[in-house]
Image (cartoon, rainbow, N blue to C red):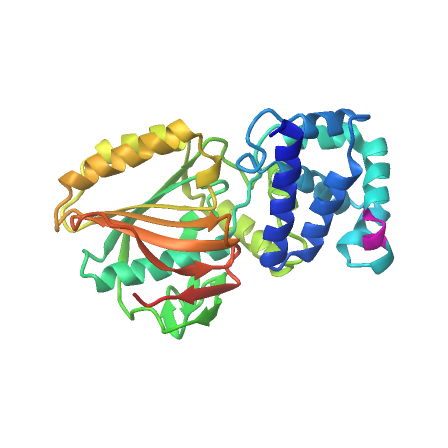
Amino acid sequence: MSNQQKVRDAFANQVEYCRSNGAPITGRMVEAIIAAIDENSELGRRILGWDGNPLADALPLRIAGGFHALQLAGHHPSLSAIYEGDGEATANAESIITETIASDEAALLPWLDSPPQTNEAGRSSSYIAGLLWLTAQELPPRYEILEIGSSAGLNLMIERYHYNLGGISVGPENAPLSFSPEWQGPPPPNARFEFESIRGCDIAPVDLAEPAQANRLTAFIWPEHKVRFERMKTAIGLVTEKAPQLDGASADDWMIEQLKKPQQEGVTRVLVHSIVWQYIPKAGRERIKQAMEAAGAKATTDRPLVWLSLEANRETYRHELTVQHWPGGGERTKLGEAHAHGVWLKWLGV
């Protein structure tokens, strides 16, 4: 298969993924971008000649973020009409995109240089549901959280948020951010737990105190999900008040280093991540797997190890919440499925 066909297939996959996750406007933008570009522009040549894996590299979302950034800057009323759902603009999206490339190609090209930052605090609802389940399995209910791919660290502030998960309340009642995803299935276990520590890493951490970085992160928010923009404003305030513990490092190097550190008795060590696995190079993913298996072989009931993740299944367009824990064999268990940005959570109640 040619590179160009792989690119077109990746864009088609992203269109379906967006539509399946409540983002028809973003899906339409992705669809129109791939229809509009050709090799007559540098942008088109770079996209169509993409040398890596365009789906794993999130190529469609990289360029979609660039167009959204132009729209958010307020200088493109025709683009804004698409994002506002105007029927005529939506129908003519390809021509609007062609015009935008002609006028703003220089501003769009840098968006191809790095993967999207898709940090979303709503995903932490899945983390909390997983911790409730783990507590019900009688693991020590004091958790050392280690998150890879933390981006701006929004999910590293989970102890500051409040959650209503199927009627189960977790976290401070007066929290500045509260999450109550549409719950499907039985409620999660009603269990109490505490955080020993919460730390994370990212290969390119986002500093929300820097306006340019905050704007970049905001551009990757799907415009259909308006509540996320308000969440981002609140999260920026929380980061400014007290920054999360976020290191700049590759996921594999950082996680291997964390696993080498002594683990306190009565503390459960938990690797967590959401919508990041595809961005980690294959060699890095393998290193993490090997390190977790080796550490899991040494885990004890007083010092257990957990791997909790929310990642996309590209065949079903669903995000699966899965968990492994040691000792006990480390078998992977699917706890449920969730919306990419925390709108709903389908709990399997296993």
Count the marks.
0
Residue shown at 55% from the left, 34% from the top: 57
Residue shown at 26% from the left, 58% from the top: 134
Q: Can you say which quadrant of the picture contains the C terminus?
A: bottom left
Question: Is residue 290 visible in this depiction of the protein?
Answer: yes
Q: Main secondary structure of the magenta part?
A: helix
Q: Is residue 142 above or below residue 191?
A: above
In the displayed structure, does residue 95 sit left or right of residue 196? right
Q: Can you say which quadrant of the picture contains the N terminus?
A: top right
Quadrant of the rendered image containing residue 137? bottom left
| Image position, residue 74 (x, y; %) | 80, 46
Question: Is residue 159 visible in this depiction of the protein?
Answer: no
Q: Is residue 198 one of those drawn in magenta? A: no
Q: Which residues are magenta?
A: 89-93
| Image position, residue 200 (x, y; %) | 38, 40
In the displayed structure, does residue 16 sit left or right of residue 81? left
Q: Is residue 92 one of those drawn in magenta? A: yes
In the displayed structure, does residue 334 sit left or right of residue 60? left
| Image position, residue 247 (x, y; %) | 41, 33
